[in-house]
Image: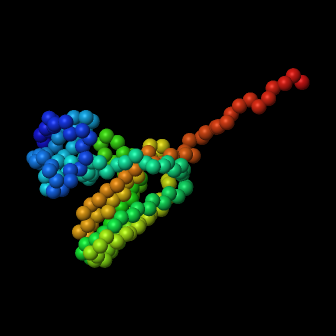
């Protein structure tokens, strides 16, 4: 395997838009000059990918979370997704949900689940929602604070979206709070 260092100032590397004025790169492994991360470029999809759990995941799918939810062992966390679909009838599209740790080498999935959905033919984008409810296990770690979801399969192009730092794992470790001396007096 040959690694090539990118000699271009690309700023933050994101998936390239298909059909745009994207430069032509040869297929292969590159090193992001900003992060030092190893990434793979696929000219067929015109996208950069990172390796995560043996699966190539497009770069640029994780986003800052708009909120943070506190959950602990035994509690339930419902993740809801929404999207619009137009195109031919699809059988077996997969809505995929994952909780885990996003880091330098991609997303380390700790909990996953999926729903299967059939999508009817439509010439206009129709809205859909999907959801899955996880029960947080006793062995949850405090760094399981990221979520990503995707839809793929049945002819649907894989589409990903995720949030970083959206979960606050609580109740894992014994904690004392508001400890103080409330009074002292001569008696």
Q: Quadrant of residue 122?
A: bottom left
Residue 108 shows in this picture: no
Residue drawn where x is 15% and y is 49% of the image? 22
33 to 80, vertically: above or below: above
- Quick one: which residue is furthest to the right in this view? 187
Q: Position of residue 74 (x, y in %)?
A: 55, 55
Residue drawn where x is 41% and y is 67% of the image? 129
Give the colour scheme of this rendering.
rainbow
- Quadrant the C terminus occupies: top right
Q: Position of residue 39 (x, y in %)?
A: 21, 43
Judged left or right of residue 91, residue 30 is left
Judged left or right of residue 93, residue 79 is right
Residue drawn where x is 34% and y is 67% of the image? 84
Residue 140 or 63: which is nearer the viewer?
A: 63
Q: Position of residue 2 (x, y in %)?
A: 12, 40
Residue 94 or 165: which is nearer the viewer?
A: 165
Residue 138 or 21: which is nearer the viewer?
A: 21
Judged left or right of residue 44, residue 106 is right
């Amino acid at each position: 395997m040959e690694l090539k260092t990118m000699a271009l100032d690309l700023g933050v590397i994101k998936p390239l838009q298909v059909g745009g004025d994207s430069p032509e790169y040869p297929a292969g492994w590159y090193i992001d000059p900003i992060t030092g991360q190893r990434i793979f470029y696929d000219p067929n999809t015109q996208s950069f990918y990172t390796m995560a759990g043996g699966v190539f995941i497009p770069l640029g799918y994780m986003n800052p979370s708009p909120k943070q939810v506190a959950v602990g062992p035994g509690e339930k966390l419902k993740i809801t997704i929404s999207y619009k679909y137009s195109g031919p009838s699809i059988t077996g599209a997969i809505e995929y949900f994952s909780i885990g740790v996003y880091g330098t080498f991609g997303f380390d999935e700790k909990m996953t689940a999926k729903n299967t959905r059939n999508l009817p033919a439509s010439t206009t984008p129709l809205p859909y929602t999907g959801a899955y409810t996880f029960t947080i296990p006793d062995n949850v770690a405090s760094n399981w604070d990221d979520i990503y979801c995707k839809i793929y399969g049945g002819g649907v192009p894989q589409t990903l979206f995720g949030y970083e730092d959206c979960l606050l794992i609580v109740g894992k470790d014994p904690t004392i709070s508001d400890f103080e001396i409330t009074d002292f007096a001569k008696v």
